[in-house]
């Protein structure tokens, strides 16, 4: 199963769903596709769409997925990377009125450059990214949380 995650942002991300639908129609995607669609209103006979699901259900969907296609939100990306799943991240872009600015582009670039994900800015490259994802092994994600805690503890101890 391919999991498509659009998150909770209030602006629609129809562009991505149209492309996934096209790839199903053309036969490039033959697996079942489940979409957490958030606020994006979209109808498709090719995919199962559900606006919002519980954390537990989402966690199960990440476990079941062979590939995750996510918007460029850090939570959606990290959830897949932490599970060692191939994540294709497509940033929501301001020029298409999918977000207020292009911070997701920066997030996707950083995670992609670090080898954690496959970043796709132009949807024409999604088909190639899906092929790459079949053999992609993400670089494991390591949170900097412990380092930050140590820095704060050191600072407090010196005060």
Image (spheres, helix red, strand yellow):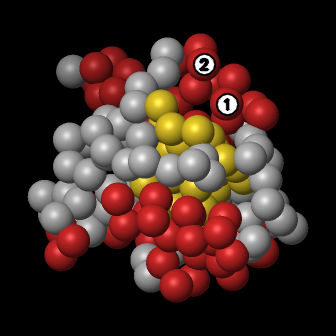
Residue at figure coordinates x 58%, y 39% from the top left: 48
Marks 2,1: beta carbons within 8 A: yes
Residue at figure coordinates x 18%, y 75% from the top left: 95
Q: Position of residue 65 (x, y in %)?
A: 74, 41
Q: Is residue 66 left or right of residue 11?
A: right
Q: Is residue 9 left or right of residue 137?
A: left
Question: Dividing the picture into quarters, in which one does residue 122 lie?
Answer: bottom left
Which residue occupies the foreground of this view, 25 or 109?
A: 25
Mark 2, Cα crowd under 10 Å, few <14 / some 14-19 / many 20+, is few
Q: Position of residue 5 (x, y in %)?
A: 50, 44
Element class at badge 1? helix
Asked if 8 appears above or below 139 in the picture, the reply is above
Which residue occupies the foreground of this view, 114 or 149?
A: 114
Which residue occupies the foreground of this view, 27 or 102?
A: 27
Residue at figure coordinates x 26%, y 52% from the top left: 12
Q: Quadrant of the N terminus?
A: top right
Question: Dividing the picture into quarters, in which one does residue 142 lie?
Answer: top right
Q: Which mark, by number, is residue 81?
A: none
Residue at figure coordinates x 65%, y 69% from the top left: 25
Asked if 21 appears above or below 140 in the picture, the reply is below
From the image, tell me which residue sits under label 1: 61
Q: Which mark, by number, is residue 57?
A: 2
Asked if 70 appears above or below 64 in the picture, the reply is below
Element class at badge 2? helix
Q: Quadrant of the C terminus?
A: top left
Q: Position of residue 134 (x, y in %)?
A: 83, 65
Q: Position of residue 85 (x, y in %)?
A: 74, 48
């Amino acid at each position: 199963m391919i999991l498509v995650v659009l998150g909770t942002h209030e602006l629609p991300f129809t562009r991505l769903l149209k492309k996934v639908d096209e790839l199903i129609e053309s036969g490039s995607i033959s697996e079942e596709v489940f979409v957490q669609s958030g606020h994006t209103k979209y109808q498709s006979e090719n995919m199962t769409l559900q606006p919002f699901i519980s954390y537990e259900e989402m966690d199960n969907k990440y476990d079941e997925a062979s590939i995750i296609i996510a918007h460029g939100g850090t939570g959606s990306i990290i959830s897949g990377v932490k599970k060692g799943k191939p994540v294709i991240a497509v940033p929501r872009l301001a020029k298409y009125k999918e977000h207020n600015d292009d911070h997701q582009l920066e997030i996707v670039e950083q995670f992609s450059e670090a080898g954690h994900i496959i970043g796709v800015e132009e949807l024409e490259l999604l088909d190639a990214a899906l092929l790459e994802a079949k053999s992609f092994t993400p670089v494991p994600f390591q949170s900097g949380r412990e380092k930050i805690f140590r820095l704060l503890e050191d600072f407090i101890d010196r005060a």
